[in-house]
Image: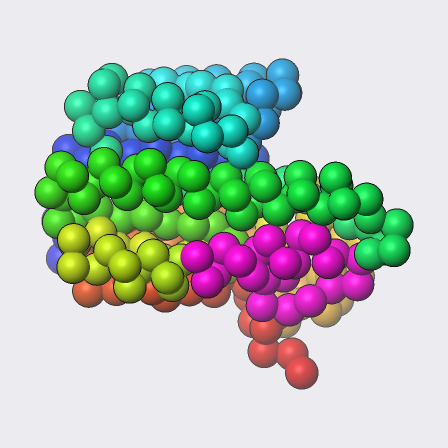
Amino acid sequence: MRDKFSLDGKRALVIGASNAIGRAIAVALAEAGADVAVATTTPLKDEETAANSCANEIWALDRKGFAQAIEAADEADVNALIERTVAELGGIELLVNAHDLPFAKPAPETDFAEWRRVIDVNLGGPFLACRAAGQRMLADGHPGGSIINVASVLGERGLANGAAYCSAQAGVLNLTRALALEWARGGVRVNAIGAGWTEGMAMAGDDESRAKLERYLPYKRLARPDEIAGIAVYLASDVSAYLTGQVVWVEGGALSHV
């Protein structure tokens, strides 16, 4: 059974490794044996710095990889990233989309440009990456190809002042299901992780918001990024070889509330 969790010889790309969840997943995949390339969601300098730091952790594990700053909603950027991953790692069997552009604003005050930006990054970005990487996996005949989309509990539950963000996250869940059906015969699995409120992520909010969240959550605390990363290793590994089109909720029981 231990060997089935091994990712030795796998080549992975994690987009959104500049945030806490994406970084934890990238490092966990490397710890499990994969070579891992990492990328940002936007080309902002702080994201680039975080992605570079993540790559350093991967190199310290004696794995191959690189860090690249991209605009995740830009088709040319995403296609070039996939091609670089294939060129430098020798192929791609694993893709993790951990895009997260937080946004909270009352709907009447939300400009359509703001709406489009949230949808473009949080839903359009994963679509572009899935399309480019999925085409490569199918063309290369990788029967063990695995795509993991990291979504939010807010894709399942609405939240006041979160129309744009909640809509994007709900879209990621059904993007996952649709692609799973489309690519199953090609041997490419597509699943999602439904992440709850997590340490280090912007949606956790300020101290006051966090305190309210912790009172609401059954565990009375936020998730740790490594608790989500472990599920990503499971979904990337041969243990989940017959699992596709599913959402694995890692939310500490939050969705069990009425």
**The N terminus: image quadrant:** bottom left
- x and y percent of residue 176 in the render? 40, 58
Residue under the image location 58 percent in, 78 percent down: 256
- x and y percent of residue 224 in the render? 54, 49
In this rendering, the answer to whether 135 lies above or below 63 is below
Q: What kind of secondary structure does the magenta stretch mostly adopt?
A: helix
30 relative to 172 in the view: left or right: left
116 relative to 184 in the view: left or right: right
Residue under the image location 59 percent in, 41 percent down: 120
Q: Does the magenta stretch include residue 70?
A: no
**Colour mapping used in the image:** rainbow
- Residue 63, quarter of picture: top left
In this rendering, the answer to whether 197 lies above or below 122 is below
Q: Specify the farthest residue to the right.
A: 109
Residue under the image location 63 percent in, 16 percent down: 45
Decide which of 225, 165 is in the foreground and name it: 165
Decide which of 12, 109 is in the foreground and name it: 109
**The C terminus: image quadrant:** bottom right
Decide which of 73, 221 is in the foreground and name it: 73
Query: Would you say residue 53 is visible in this rendering?
Result: no
Q: Specify the farthest residue to the bottom.
A: 258
Residue under the image location 37 percent in, 49 percent down: 148
Magenta stretch bounds: 153-175
Decide which of 238, 177 is in the foreground and name it: 177
- x and y percent of residue 30 in the render? 30, 33
Q: Is residue 168 magenta?
A: yes
Number of marks in picture:
0
Query: Would you say residue 216 is visible in this rendering?
Result: yes
- x and y percent of residue 38 in the render? 41, 27
